[in-house]
Image (tube, coloured by chain):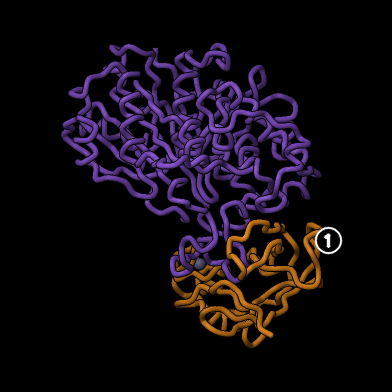
Chain colours: A orange, B purple
């Protein structure tokens, strides 16, 4: 059953990102001018200002860079506390906020290898698949 | 940038140094107002932003020994809105030639006013910051702002993962710091504990009761690994600074406090990496060095630091970033007594944002003025000549250096 989640950011670029997730692909923009990979979605490259940005599938592999656990219910019943969030350093460069899957922050270690997996979710925009990370 | 609308600053040039001075300061009754707001006695109405601004203004004017006719410009600063500046002027009983909204947080407003004084646009300015966030029930995080506002570097982007609070930024930094440098929660706890000890000497501080490391560890988490005590307060209040040209300031009753240096630096890309891994070190270093060069000072000349302790770990980041102690040693520096009276750099000596008040960077300027004048009583730093403030957010830093003007 799809897990209810707070709403995604939509709009230009974001639809493409979420369509990738629906196919089980983690897409990150890449600048056609300087090669920089920004995250989250931007309209112009944060490094060189170019708008030649195209989504590219990344490996989905990375290392655990940090983590924290929410203890206050910022989202009411939508995200019952406590819940874990993580920061993943993707092999391709970007640092990606996510949730752990199959492990808890109490087991987390700095630099632990992780890989992307997709969780069936639903928000006010409809059903979607959320990229989360499990131990590699 | 996560915080749009920073006040533009003149460049960090030597010829702008010590050309304008703070000659009066006023602040509101943080402690009393916070207590009243908590108790919410029958019939209690929290003070409005207008009332708060007027109280801070009246106190600053009395402090400066000035008359209403001496003020020719009124610069208002609001984070969550406030009265029209012209209406505010008449409420304050002044008839300035110019009244306008000059920004919000303490990221640029003071250098901006120095620039206007130097250009002759204004002479003697009342700068007022007023905020009514506590009584408005504002909670920094969650769905207070909709996801529709989500921008590239905004944390509202991360709603679907439940990652949305200012505190979560600091929690991510702290967790990585712990893992990288072999520290624990009970080590970091010394930072808010020392800042609270500082606040215990300040009658107007919101939180004055010292706590122990055991009490810190027993306190609830906001975002693990950060406890309640690691996060700044949220309160209503106002701050007023009266600023005039340095030569005019020499004729006034109090020792003038000169604005000697400033700078700014932003994270422009890879925000999460720079924020969580580098903890803004490159930004803090470059802005700090530029402000010092503008003031013609070295770090050794700085005798007081008022850092932006929006979270305990961020005060550590700033102590390390400015170079008071090497990378990875800020917590030990604190435990060793180096950020308190008698140590290398008395830091947030009146209680900072975690215990005194949270006025978005403005709240620590009055303590710098008191210290540089020698009016700080039991917590006076001996022989002080230069102080540093820093408004340091998740993605930018705005240091200002102040010197005694006599
Ligand atoms: Zn580029």
The chain holding disc 1 is A
Query: For disc 1, does the CB lie below 8 Å from ligand 1?
Result: no
Tell me if I can see residue A47 in this picture: no
Q: Position of residue B85 (x, y in %)?
A: 24, 42
Picture quadrant of residue B18 = top left
| Residue nearer the viewer, A133 or B285 | A133
Residue plotted at (76% across, 42% down)? B217
Q: Residue furthest front?
A: B42
Location of residue B235 with respect to A18 vertically, above or below: above
Front in this rendered view, residue B142 or B38: B38
Instruction: Please give left or right for residue B120 compared with residue B274 in the image.
Output: left
Name the residue at 57% across, 17% down. B379
Residue under pointer 1? A107
- Against B373, residue B311 (above or below) is below
User: Picture coordinates of residue A72 (x, y %)?
Assistant: 64, 57
Tell me residue B123's x, y (percent): 23, 27
Q: Is residue B137 left or right of residue B209?
A: left
Count of number-bearing discs: 1
Q: Quadrant of the C terminus of chain B?
A: top left
Number of other residues with Cα within 10 Å of mark 1, as a class: few under 14, some 14 to 19, many 20 or more: few
Q: Nearer the viewer, residue A6 or B170?
A: A6
Q: Position of residue B263 (x, y in %)?
A: 45, 38
Q: Residue furthest bottom?
A: A23
Residue B24 shows up from this direction:
yes
Q: Residue at coordinates 46% horizontally, 35% vertically from top-left? A: B33
- To which quarter of the image does residue A37 belong? bottom right
Look at 64% across and 29% down and name the residue there.
B209
Please determine whether, in this image, residue A9 is positioned above or below residue B212. below
SS assignment at label 1 = helix
Q: Is residue B301 left or right of residue A71?
A: left
């Amino acid at each position: 059953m799809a897990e209810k989640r707070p709403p995604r950011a939509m709009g230009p670029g974001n639809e493409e990102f979420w369509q990738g997730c629906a196919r089980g692909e983690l897409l990150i923009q890449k600048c056609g001018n300087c090669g920089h990979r920004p995250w989250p979605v931007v309209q112009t490259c944060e490094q060189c200002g170019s708008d030649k940005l195209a989504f590219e599938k990344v490996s989905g592999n990375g290392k655990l860079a940090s983590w924290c656990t929410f203890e206050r219910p910022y989202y009411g019943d939508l995200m019952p506390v406590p819940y874990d969030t993580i920061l993943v350093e993707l092999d391709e460069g970007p640092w990606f906020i996510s949730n752990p899957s199959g492990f808890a922050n109490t087991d987390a270690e700095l630099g632990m290898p992780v890989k992307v997996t997709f969780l069936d979710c639903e928000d006010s925009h409809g059903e979607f698949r959320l990229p989360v990370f499990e131990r590699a | 940038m996560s915080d749009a609308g920073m006040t533009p600053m003149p460049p960090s040039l030597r010829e702008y140094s010590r050309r304008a001075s703070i000659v009066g300061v006023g602040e509101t009754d943080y402690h009393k107002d916070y207590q009243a707001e908590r108790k919410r006695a029958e019939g209690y109405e929290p003070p409005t932003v207008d009332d708060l601004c007027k109280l801070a203004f009246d106190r600053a004017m009395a402090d400066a020994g000035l008359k209403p006719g001496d003020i020719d410009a009124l610069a208002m600063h609001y984070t969550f809105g406030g009265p029209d500046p012209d209406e505010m002027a008449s409420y304050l009983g002044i008839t300035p030639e110019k009244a306008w909204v000059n920004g919000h947080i303490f990221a640029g407003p003071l250098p901006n006013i120095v620039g206007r004084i130097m250009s002759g646009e204004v002479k003697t300015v009342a700068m007022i910051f007023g905020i009514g966030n506590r009584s408005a029930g504002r909670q920094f995080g969650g769905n207070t702002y909709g996801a529709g506002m989500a921008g590239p570097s905004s944390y509202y982007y991360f709603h679907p993962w439940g990652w949305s609070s200012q505190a979560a930024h600091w929690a991510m930094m702290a967790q990585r710091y712990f893992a990288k440098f072999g520290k624990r929660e009970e080590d970091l706890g010394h930072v808010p504990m020392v800042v609270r000890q500082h606040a215990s000497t300040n009658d107007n501080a919101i939180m004055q009761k010292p706590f122990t490391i055991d009490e810190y560890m027993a306190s609830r988490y906001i975002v693990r690994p950060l406890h309640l005590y690691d996060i700044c307060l949220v309160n209503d209040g106002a701050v007023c600074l009266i600023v005039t040209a340095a030569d005019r300031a020499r004729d006034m009753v109090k020792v003038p406090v000169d604005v000697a240096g400033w700078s700014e630096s932003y994270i422009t890309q890879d925000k999460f990496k720079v924020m969580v891994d580098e903890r803004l070190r490159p930004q803090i270093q470059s802005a700090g060095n530029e402000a010092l060069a503008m003031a013609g000072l070295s770090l050794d000349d700085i005798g007081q630091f008022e850092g932006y302790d929006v979270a305990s770990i961020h005060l550590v980041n700033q102590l390390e970033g400015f170079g008071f102690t090497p990378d990875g040693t800020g917590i030990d520096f604190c435990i060793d007594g180096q950020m308190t009276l008698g140590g290398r750099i008395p830091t947030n000596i009146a209680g900072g944002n975690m215990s005194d008040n949270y006025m978005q960077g403005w709240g620590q300027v009055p303590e710098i003025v008191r210290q540089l004048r020698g009016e700080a009583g039991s917590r006076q730093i001996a022989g002080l000549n230069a102080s540093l403030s820093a408004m340091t957010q998740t993605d930018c830093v705005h240091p200002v250096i102040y010197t005694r003007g006599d």
